Amino acid sequence: MTAARTPDQADWQIVVGLEVHVQLLTNSKLFSPAPSSYGDRANENVDVVDVALPGSLPVPNAAAVDMALALGLALGCTVRRHSVFARKHYFYPDLPKGYQISQFDAPILEGGAVPVDGRLVPLTRIHLEEDAGKSLHAEGEDASFLDYNRAGTPLLEVVSEPALAGADEAERYFRALRRLVMALGICDGNLAEGSMRADANVSVRRPGAALGQRVELKNLNSPRFLALAVEHEARRQVAELSAGRAIVQQTRQWDADRGESRVLRTKEDAEDYRYFEDPDLPPLVVTEAQIARVRAALPELPDAKRDRFVQALGLSAEDAAVLTSEREIAALFEGALAVHGNARALANWVKNEVLAVVNARGLEPSTVAQVVSAPALGALVQLLDEGAISGKTAKDVFAELASGRGTDPVRIVDGRGWRLQRDDAALARTVGDVIAANAADWQKLVGGKDKLLGFFVGAVMKKSGGTVDPKTVSRLLQEALAKARG
């Protein structure tokens, strides 16, 4: 989205830093063997480690460490060979231990940058930490309930520098990071389930001035809400400063329904959390062999895939960007390309037909495989390119596939009798019959009323049951017309 800008904001710069929490796709939690899954019965997946019962000891999840390394290598981060887990203390009912195991002054990854539309947005750090539980506030009941299933779920916190210039760039950064973690296979990117959540630190300043006082916006779980919240907070700060009031350091929560934020608490500083090294966890050691193994397993990254689509397949930059916007869209395109090699035609079908159905059904773009399979899409475009079916028939076949009434384009075409006829002699006789049946209109066409040509093409197509190539029909009519005109 493009953020709106009020006249007052024209003399101010918006500065944003993001802390994005990425939930990792591990089978178990970060420090316990409890399942890390979504949607299970409340408090079903809770281990003694998750609630710090006496005598329980945390053990780091090796898969989570590998996933952290994969993201760090993809973003050009410096890998710390000996990182440290720390206890971050605060009291909240959904934090059963009274502290969160995180990393403070010795994170596993430092530096690096997220590529956003050709610009590298610098990172401060990426660190591992466990998630808290979830408070459930039942409507109509004077009570809250606690679900600790999420407590201990492994997260990566990706912390950017205050280097994002406003709401639009913050939104594009979030989308770029989401594309990357999904391509790496370390996060499912499910925003509705909270698999990625952003905290935005927003400040405003006059051009050339020092950074202003920041305000944190918590738990923004979609790129659109992130952009709306940042823009709203920037307007609020400009209004405060323009009225001669100071910006108070605080944490605010975005209310998407009302389109406004509200104060949660005055912002704490690091010392308020009483960080100290977790005595139950030794330093996390990363070896060169481990780094080499993770690097060798890295898939093709979205930006590299986009460039390859442009350079090797001849696609436009716009089409390549659409096809690599989601891992599933790229998979559908490449799967179809393995069946039929017309990259440009397939790109057009994905962009103009498949995604149109996704949008019409109100689905996420990642659900493209629910509309059509890659083999079916490839086979459909191949039938069209070979001249076996017309463009209109191709869309009819696609409608059958998208509605679930068939899975094989060839069977649909042959079963419905939609394959184009190739008998030019028979088609020429049909053209002659149509001309004879519409002799008055034909004379008008011969006399120069060229708009009637479309009528005759349609009449031949109708008489043939739509099983002839309209281009061939047009050619035969043009030949007959030229002959009639002498």
Image: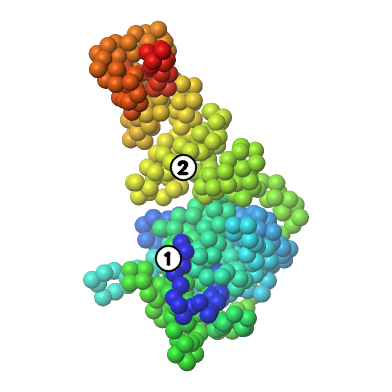
> Where does label 1 land, which residue?
225
Residue 295 visible from this viewpoint: yes
The residue that appears at 52% across and 50% down in the rendered structure is 325
Count of numbered circles on the image: 2
The C terminus lies in quadrant? top left
Q: Which of 248 and 425 is in front in this view?
A: 425
Q: Is residue 309 found left or right of 402 in the rendered image? A: right
Q: What element carries label 2?
A: helix
Q: Is mark 1 on a helix, strand or loop?
A: helix
Q: Which of 220 and 341 is in front in this view?
A: 341
**Kind of residue at badge 2:** Lys
Asked if 310 appears above or below 425 in the picture, the reply is below
Q: Nearer the viewer, residue 383 or 447?
A: 447
The residue that appears at 51% across and 84% down in the rendered structure is 249
Asked if 51 appears above or below 426 in the picture, the reply is below
The residue that appears at 59% across and 49% down in the rendered structure is 302
- Mark closer to the chain start, 2 or 1: 1
x, y (%) of residue 354? 42, 40
> Where does label 2 land, which residue?
351
Asked if 447 appears above or below 342 in the picture, the reply is above
Instruction: Name the front one of labels 2 and 1.
Output: 2
Most extreme residue toward the right, as rendered?
288
Q: Do the residues labelled 2 and 1 touch (CB within 8 Å)?
A: no
